[in-house]
Amino acid sequence: MDLYAGIALLLLACIGNAAWWAILVNRAHSLRYDASNLKYVRKLHDVGIILFPPLAFWFMGWTESGLLRGGSVTELPFVLQVLLMFALCGLLPFICSVLRWQARQAPAELLKATSQHFDVLKIQHVESDRQAVRGERIPLLAKFPGNQIHRLEVTRKYLSLPGRQADAGRNRRTIKVAQLSDTHFVGCPGRRYFEFATDRLCELQPDIFVFTGDLIDDEELFPWAFDMFSRLSGVAPGYSILGNHDWRLNHGRIRKGLVDTGWVDLGEKHTSISIGDVSVLLAGTEAPWIGSNPEVPVPGDEDVRILLSHSPDQRNYAHQQQFDLMLCGHNHGGQVVLPVIGPVYAPSRYGVKYAGGTYRHQQMLIHVSRGLGAQEALRLNCCPEVTLLEVEI
Ligand SMILES: [Fe+2]
């Protein structure tokens, strides 16, 4: 093998190796593992990705009969051959992921989408509160060039429901659901940023608000959450579930705190509500972290069945229970979206397939919010968002 072919093969092996580690981290974060175990997995991932290239170039490349010294793969020791092949196999899921990202298309049931972008740090009327927008605990990561952690996208999406289109001739009605998710109050962005987001949410004038988990990472900041959620529940009824970050804290206290702000807790529960003359079955699941998926009535007279699930991994349960719409958070859009490649990390059994956006699964629509905050203050090509879903029934 000539030198350049050897270099190319080893570089491809490095990419494949990194892809395997990303798959491991994504899968581990979709499970009910506590923070210390996940930290261990992340450290293993860091070491595996950092050490593989120099070790591969040395032991597979530069040693006698190595790939960079005119040797071939079959001349390598058997263990290294297996390792090289295994690393190269990682290219397959990586290429599939990139192709899926490149070929992504919104489902036909997403009739229209519009959005407004705000750079909250640069908005004139909050300019004087710059520090309060940034937050008091600004990690180094927040200063990364191009970081969008202080931006906000307010999206309006108009949806029809695949399972309800057969009812032709019926009067079409629309319900307006505003979704916010993954606020992750941790100190950055600051309180003023969330006040700005609350103003925008109130302006949407929805029929209901829904919150799909990961409220807080620093319980001392609960007053921020209390202010935000109290204001929202004063505008329209709010329904909430918790997420895996809440599970790691005193989730009973967080749940009570949300209920005290006037929000209805839907963790492992369901309720029937009316929005105008539209009857809605609303349910919530915090599985696999808290409780399990709720037992819900079989489809009846309700006009629409909506599930709040922190993770889109509950997709199959939602489909089995014939929900029309599943609203999720958790994946943060991948947080870092690379040019051409797309997102690499999403804490899901499906990897980055449901990183963020609107998807169709069988007769059900799934909307995964990119969320408002993040524990690690880094978002590249992945703006925080709140969404108004106008659902045609
Ligand atoms: Fe989250």
Image (cartoon, rainbow, N blue to C red):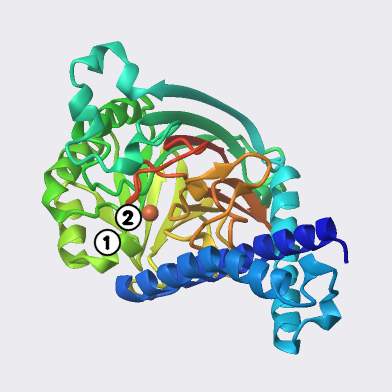
Please rate how many residues cluster around mark 2, counting C-alpha atoms within 10 Å: few if below 14, some from 14 to 19, many from 20.
Answer: many
Question: Secondary structure under badge 1?
Answer: helix
Task: Judge whether residue 261 can be spotted in this image.
Answer: yes
How far across and down, in percent of the image, does residue 288 sit?
41, 73
Q: Nearer the viewer, residue 315 or 143?
A: 143
The residue type indicated by label 1 comes to Asp
Quadrant position of the C terminus in the picture = top right
CB at disc 2 and ligand 1 closer than 8 Å: yes
Answer with the quarter of the image where residue 241 lies.
bottom left
Residue positioned 26% across, 34% down in the render: 194
Q: Nearer the viewer, residue 73 or 123?
A: 73
> Outermost residue toward the right?
1
Residue positioned 55% across, 33% down in the render: 157
Task: Judge whether residue 318 can be spotted in this image.
Answer: no
Q: Is residue 101 left or right of residue 214?
A: right
How far across and down, in percent of the image, does residue 205 sit?
36, 28
The residue type indicated by label 2 comes to Asp
Q: Which residue is mark 1?
A: 246
> Outermost residue toward the bottom?
78
Q: Is residue 108 above or below residue 347?
A: above
How far across and down, in percent of the image, does residue 385 sit?
43, 36
Earlier-in-chain disc, 2 versus 1: 2
Residue positioned 51% across, 25% down in the render: 115
Q: Which residue is mark 2?
A: 214
Q: Which mark is residue 265?
A: none
Answer with the quarter of the image where residue 318 lies.
bottom right
**Marks 2 and 1, how far apart at CA:** 6 Å
